[in-house]
Amino acid sequence: MKRFYVTTPIYYVNSKPHLGHVYTTLIADTLFRLKSQRGFDTFFLTGTDEHGQNIERAAAKNERPVKEHVDAIVAEFKSIFEKFNFCYSHWVRTTDDYHEEGAQELFRKVRDAGYIYKSHYEGWYCVGCAEFKEEMEAGKAPYCELHNREAERVSEESYFFKLSAFQDRLLKLYEERPDFIQPEVRRNEVISFVKSGLKDLSVSRVSVKWGIPLPDDPSHTMYVWFDALSNYITAIGYGNNKRSGFDNYWPANLQLVGKDIIRFHTVYWPAFLLAAGVEPPQKVYAHGMWLSGGRKMSKSLGNVININILLKHFSTDQIRYFCLREMVFGQDGDFTYEALIERCNADLAKGLGNLVSRTLKMVEKYCDSNLPAKPKAFLLTMPETAWHKEAIEVREVVLANRARFELEFSSYNFSRALEAVWEIIARVDKYISDNAPWKLAKDPSAREHLETVLYTVLEAIRFIAVLLVPILPDSALSVWKQVGLFSTPEEINPESLVWGELAEGITLGELKTLFPTIDKELTMSEIQKEESVEVTETTESKPTENREFLPLRPEITIDDFAKIDLRVAKVLEAERIPKADKLLKLIVDLGEEKPRQILAGIAQYYTPEQMVGRKIVIVANLEPRKLRGLESQGMLLAASIGEQGQPVLASFLEEVPIGARLK
Ligand code: ME8
């Protein structure tokens, strides 16, 4: 029996679940359902990443014990995933006993193979990324653009993993298995990263307490990524006897991740496995990111799509459809409620929903709610009439698009796979309009023609339900029941679905509206109101959430302060910098002879349009420095707030002239 093991990343429990987390999980869920339907022995793993400094700090900020904090967030994740009816086979938590045992065993195997040594780590670490950062300039803290803060100095004893010994082996792996990393663009990025040289990796911390102790040296905790990545095998019994399935399911067929964490999954992860003598997974697919208003959806920016608001207005099937149809898998996509409503109305209500409802109403009316028998058209070797011929032609369109659907899905082209189904819907709609069953019903001599049309359309609908059930599980089942069919569509393998086997003498089930048409204006105004309440609530609760007070820096004299020249400047131009997602290039007027160029790590929080014309405060006498080959002649001031250090620009309530000095 063929098997299919699919995993999602395990999500950090330092913030609530949002659409991004739901997205990866719904793709895994769809693939899991699709493969199960096709007879595979399937396993679907998701879960939570619960260790590390970041989580330790998030708990401290909420003033509760770490375990209590992680349990509460895990419960939130689970309740959202339950609402989506995700049918994961197992939920792994890195705080589970078996996982700790298994992760320690993996570490032991890597160490026994000679790839771990003890040394001293002297360098920089970004807690937000859980990543060690390269020093760009001697003695200066590297700046993390993603978290808008400087990395922290770490100087401690540490165990190292000999990542440098794996450069050639990894490159060989990428070459021998070209589809190990998908899509191609990510594969190329990873190859050039590895070619540029790999340094040994610090894989333990003494200063972090919330983690898995190292085997034989519990004064160290395991590096969070070593701990987290091992979940994919500990959850199926590697290194422990509380779980099982490793021999059957490993190597995983597909590990789904967002492109933000590709390097951990395609460089560190296979290197750890190779070191321990375990085969790497078959494929790592890194999908794109949902953006909101052109910017990466992020909790600190406040532009995440709130799942509760989303679920209040849309069914899980509508959301699943939109996510798979709208975003070209692998690329970034912009999420807007307007686009979601449009898709729901055009494709689901007017498209699929209308086809099913008009067809079933005709069966109700013209056939007394009984499905017509298999027509002659499908029994003849040569069609006798033009309408026989047309019925056969519709069948061919259905069969061809079933094949296209399978092909596109197997290449992860979800959007195109859905287009194939909607091509069937369009063809069948046209078939109905051209043959006008409502006219045929008035003419008793046209009975065979009428039943041929209805049967053909019902067969097409049966095929559509079977194809769509992994994507729209509730709606496909509803169609099935409304038609009056037995069992469920998910029990039917589309590959063995035979045209013309629609059982005879079936009576329709109860008819229901599949997808109501959404009133765009009304829904948008409701959503906007709910979002503004949500924003106020989050902002109002900020002071309690944000109680952390960073220690003051050492005292300075007024003369020290007087050395800093702070000035008001006006932004004349602003633009994004290609290949630097986080930076904006600003041209600012300080009242000097010539405007200055400033590079600021705010692109994820402010658009160029928002910046132009705005007055800001800059450190005007800061030594210029180069970023991405461009000179930055000053630094703008912003408050750094929230977990991610979101910048909020310093500004004035009263009018201030350009060039004014702050003191
Ligand atoms: O990185 N669009 O956890 P995490 C699409 N614990 N997908 C998104 C998204 C967005 N805007 N935002 C998040 C971690 N995701 C680690 C993983 S695995 C051993 C450890 C999805 O909570 C996407 O899958 O930050 C991304 O890779 C993941 O959530 C990051 O989740």
Image (cartoon, rainbow, N blue to C red):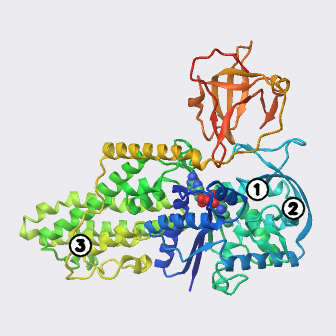
* Crowd around label 3: few <14 · some 14–19 · many ≥20 (10 Å): many
Residue visible at 85% across and 58% down in the picture: 198
Q: Which residue is denoted by mark 1 in the rendering? A: 131
Instruction: Locate residue 635 relative to residue 419 in the image: left or right.
Output: right
For the question of whether residue 625 can be seen, the reply is yes
Q: Amino acid at mark 2?
A: Asp
When the figure is inspected, residue 541 is found, relative to residue 397, above or below; the finding is: above
Query: Which is in the foreground here, disc 3 or disc 2?
Result: 2
Q: Quadrant of ligand 1?
A: bottom right
Query: Which is in the foreground here, disc 1 or disc 2?
Result: 1
At which x and y percent is residue 452?
Answer: 21, 71
Q: Secondary structure at mark 2?
A: loop
For the question of whether residue 183 can be seen, the reply is no
At which x and y percent is residue 135?
Answer: 85, 46
Mark found first going from the N terminus, 3 or 1: 1
Q: Amino acid at mark 1?
A: Glu
When the figure is inspected, residue 144 is found, relative to residue 357, above or below; the finding is: above
* Crowd around label 2: few <14 · some 14–19 · many ≥20 (10 Å): some
Q: Which residue is denoted by mark 3 in the rendering? A: 455
- The circle drawn on residue 200 is 2
* Quadrant occupied by the C terminus: top right
Residue visible at 60% across and 39% down in the picture: 605
Question: How far, Cα to Cα, is label 3 from label 2?
Answer: 66 Å
Mark found first going from the N terminus, 3 or 2: 2
Quadrant in the picture for residue 428: bottom left
